[in-house]
Image (cartoon, grey):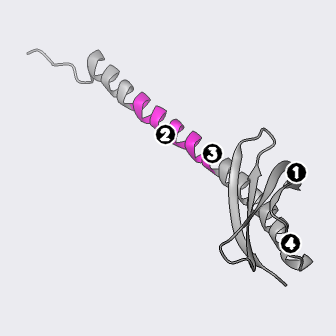
């Protein structure tokens, strides 16, 4: 009577290791993407705060803005942001459209926030 050995063959073990390695690689890639997305979201939220602050300051000034571009800078969450307030006329002369375009310190555009201001 011969007794047959029980267990996995070398080929079965290698296939199982390959499957585990592929699954772990996909998991690490997904975790990296989540980290990048969280960082991007943090940057966009801070940029929105900068744009909101600039547009609110224009509303509180109660002055009718002139047509043109104006640069501004802002710091939120320990990061510096640059921006441009782009003021354009509308078909109705009593209103102006103002776009706040906020970019990262490196110049990468992050956000554009728009509003319409009326003549006081």
Q: How far is disc 2 from disc 3 in space, using C-alphas?
A: 12 Å
Which of the 4 image quadrants contains residue 57? bottom right
In terms of depth relative to the viewer, which is nearer, 56 or 75?
Answer: 56
Provide the residue designation for mark 1: 78
Is 20 situated left or right of 27 in this image? left
Say which residue label 3 marks.
35
Count numbered badges in the picture: 4
Identify residue for label 2: 27
* Distance (Cα) linking label 1 and label 2: 31 Å
**Category of crowding for the residue at label 2, using alpha-carbon neighbours closer than 10 angstroms: few (below 14), some (14–19), many (at least 20):** few
Q: Secondary structure at mark 4?
A: helix
Give me the residue at 31% from left, 23% from top.
Answer: 15
Residue 120 percent location from the top left of the image? 85, 85
* Quarter of image, res 104: top right
Q: Give the mark toward the camera: 3 or 4.
A: 4
Q: Earlier in the sequence, mark 3 or mark 4?
A: 3
SS at mark 1 in the image: loop
Nearer-N-terminus badge (1/2): 2
Boundaries of the magenta span: 20-37
x, y (%) of residue 100? 75, 60
Residue at 43%, 28% in the rendered image? 21
Residue 58's tag is 4
Q: Nearer the viewer, residue 82 or 69?
A: 69
Q: Residues within 10 Å of mark 3 (few under 14, many from 20)?
A: few
Which numbered mark, 1 or 2, is in the foreground of this view? 1
Q: Residue at (89%, 80%) from the top-left corner? A: 62
C-alpha gap between disc 4 and disc 2:
47 Å
Tag in front: 3 or 1: 1
């Amino acid at each position: 009577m011969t007794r047959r050995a029980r267990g996995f063959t070398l080929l079965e073990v290698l296939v199982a290791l390959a499957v585990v390695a592929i699954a772990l690689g996909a998991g690490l890639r997904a975790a990296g993407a989540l980290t990048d997305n969280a960082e991007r979201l943090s940057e966009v939220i801070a940029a929105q705060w900068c744009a909101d602050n600039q547009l609110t300051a224009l509303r509180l000034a109660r002055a009718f803005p002139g047509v043109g571009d104006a640069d501004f800078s802002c710091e939120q969450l320990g990061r510096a942001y640059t921006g441009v307030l782009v003021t354009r006329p509308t078909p109705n002369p009593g209103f102006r459209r103002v776009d706040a375009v906020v970019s990262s310190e490196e110049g990468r555009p992050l956000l554009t926030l728009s509003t319409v201001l009326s003549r006081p």
